[in-house]
Image (cartoon, helix red, strand yellow):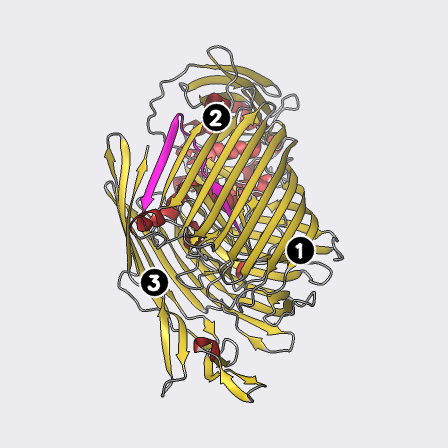
Amino acid sequence: MRLASSPALRRHARAVITLLQLLGIACLAVAPPARAQEMATSQFVPLRPDGNGVAWLRRPLGVVVDTTTVARALQAVARQAGLNLTFDPYLSGLDAPAPRPSISGRVAEALLVILSATRLEARVSASGELVLAPLPASRDFTGGIRGQVVDSAASPIAGAIVSLAALRSSAATDAGGRFTFERLPAGRVTLRVHAFGYVDQQQTAIVPAGGTADLVFRLTAAPARLTPVRTESRTARQITFEDRPSVSTTTMGARDVRGVPSAVEADVMRTVQLLPGVSARNDYSSTLNVRGGESEQNLILLDGYPIFNPFHLAGLFSTFIPAAIGEVTLLSGGFPASYGNRLSSVLDVRSSEEKRDGMHGTADVSLLSASATVRGTFGRSGGSWMLAGRRTYADKFVNAFNPDALPYHFRDVQGHLTYRLPGSVTLATTLYAGEDVVIASTSPDHLTFGNRVLGATLTKSIGDPTAPGGRRLELTQRVSSSRFHTAVLAPDEGFTLGATADELRLAGTVTAPGTSHDRTLGYELAAQRFDYATNTTVVLLPVDSFRQRATRASVFYDDLWRVRPSLLVQAGVRADLPVSGQRALISPRLSAKYFLSPDLALTAAVGRYTQSVHSLGREDVPLRLADFWTTSDSLLPFSTAMHYIAGLERRVGTSRTLRVEGFLKAYDNLLEPNPASDARVAGDEFLPTTGRSYGVDVLLQQFGAGRFSGWLAYTFAVSTRRQADGVEYHPGQDRRHDLNLVGSWRGSAWTVGTRFGLATGTPYTAAIGEFDRREYDPVMGTLDGRSGAESRVYLMGARNAERLPISHRLDLSLTRNGRLRGLAVSPYLSIVNAYNARNAFAYFYDYRRSPPTRSSAPQFPTLPSVGVDVVW
């Protein structure tokens, strides 16, 4: 609405404004330029961040996101503050872009921030009337502050936080202790500096119109004793929700992992199995089937470096040491172009990084193993280090009474280091080595398998990271070596097997963050070697031997685009370049988030995904002893999948989220191991299949901000596969309904953890008959049967036509939190399957009896375990 400039109409408008104020509704009026200038110089004074003592100008706001232009930002502030807003739409500067994608704080502070992008100023009268007027042509409307933070010896302090409380703005000092604020409203401001290990300091400065004020903060070292500090900075989860589409992304901290009751000890992979979209085949396996995909289709990373088989004891335990893990992120679909060579999901496991001075550690002793972790920092130079180790000791205990009764153990070593180098360069390295060993002193037979991962990452920032919207680049360069090996030797039986999977990877990215776009360009080069050799004829193991060498090259581009404050779009494309006779594969990907309100958003994603590495393990087998890897070449095509995802995400406060997503995955060229493969024929190791998976995920998550944390996860999913001959079937991971309730209550002395799971059965192939195999003796002219079980042959029904019954289980844990001689000592009790539910693992048939019988092999019975954590 435009206010006319006639005296009569102006009198009417002022009367209306006065009436609205009397009714308790503040009115923001913008007078025509000429009259506004006259009013501004007579009875109105400049608006201050404190609202000039006017109550309605000090009202707090939530986050205002509808801020495309200055005019829209003013209207959005008025709507949320309950104000009646009237302004002249022809006033110069109202169509300028708003200075920030979102506005918060108090009404006066928000108005000053919005107007900093224009040549307009706000003035307020003693009665609370507000007008906007053009600044005089000779005046600039903003200024700046630059400064440096140093210690008493004039050495720069990096990482100090400089904040402008009134404007809700802050900046971090760079390696030289420097900071900069730009486009600040002219006038008096108060700055506060906080740096770890120093006394906070506060200064008042005058921001000159059109100029820059210079400041120096000299901080005094503070005692090491810390006092409680309240911070209002955004958490990582808030940043993910507000600044990224984050489709199908779930993040858990170490506290979430350790709060879940578990068999014997905390386990990262078994905790991930309780998230929506993830299916656990049975109690004995910690492998992952995500949204109907095969277990080989998951890219598992340790600090960004791939790891092939992160499992011990045929998948019963994962290789990750719980105390060495800092954060776990699962991308169950729609992941961006920076991730490649997998069809279903990405599991990114991050090592813990110490923030406290000095050396600290953790020791954990359970019924299965003993582990120890030590960590520390490099002082003021920046960086941290961590070293962890774990080994089972059950073999030592049992074999002390009965030699070779338990000739098995596994061990893990994990290390992580970060160090800040000169020139804004950070070095991060990770080492992991784990191995399973089965060897007896009284037998030459032995079995070993394990992983090795070694990686290093260099990151560097170019430009001023404290300058908002400034030109800067973030460079990342990674190099890693990943290896998985298996060796089996049984000379008495004439059985040998050896397999290795090696990958040397070089990868890098260049990211240019900006106000509207965060653009990333990256590449990956991988040299791979896959060897498999055996003389076995065991049905469950591959019979073909092979040696493969391959080089893979990929480039990708990703753009996170803030189209408007209410719309985020992440678009990217990945190109897997032609190597080993394959054509180039282009994989476009797109995801978006649209905010219906600051706490409610719609999400969507679509993308193409490819995979060149394949496992020779059969998915229908409920237990996978190990994965033997091969790669696509001129005879084996790439597998591909299309992801389609749509969902809704709701944030409730700062510690709770609700996410509902529907998904559809369409597969092509899935390669299933051929049980009738001929070792003399190359290229028949796999049978091509197609298929699809679709369903709905629900996640209600309470973060660990208070005494309670946990989540409710539910998945409905349907998966089908089609063989080359047109026969359709449901794969072994097709679980229709899967519900998990997880909770952890933390008190001052006790911590209680619970998990209840309810799931429908997975499909299996039933035996419908049995006969004895006989061999013809041409000399005697007779048919002779083989001895014992070797003569038994089953007639199988339609593939996966039957289903196991519903399974359910309640797990409990109880931890006593205490201290002993300066150490935090926490003994714990964990009970898996507390009420001893009889869940079926598999069925066995005996048609030699009359009538034939079917018996079931059980899943976990009631399994109590105890242990103790010691932290110093």
Determine crowd level at label 1: few under 14, some 14-19, many 20+ residues with C-alpha closer than 10 A.
Answer: few
Tell me which label, 2 or 1, sits earlier in the chain.
Answer: 2
Which residue ends up furthest to the top in the rendered image?
153
The dot on residue 860 is 3
- Which residue is pictured at 44% across the width and 52% down the height? 439
- Which residue is pictured at 63% across the width and 67% down the height? 686
- Which residue is pictured at 53% across the width and 88% down the height? 782
Which residue is label 1 attached to?
Answer: 547
Q: Which quarter of the picture shows residue 523?
A: top right
Residue 123 at x, y percent in the picture: 51, 28
Q: Magenta stretch: residue 367 in it?
A: yes
Determine crowd level at label 3: few under 14, some 14-19, many 20+ residues with C-alpha closer than 10 A.
Answer: some
The dot on residue 161 is 2
How many dots with numbers?
3
Q: Nearer the viewer, residue 604 or 733?
A: 733
Amino acid identity at mark 2: Ile
- Does the image show residue 11? no
- Does the image show residue 231? yes
Question: Disc 3 or disc 1, which is closer to the eye?
Answer: 1
- Which residue is pictured at 51% across the width and 45% down the height? 240
Q: Secondary structure at mark 1?
A: strand
Q: Which residues are magenta?
A: 346-368
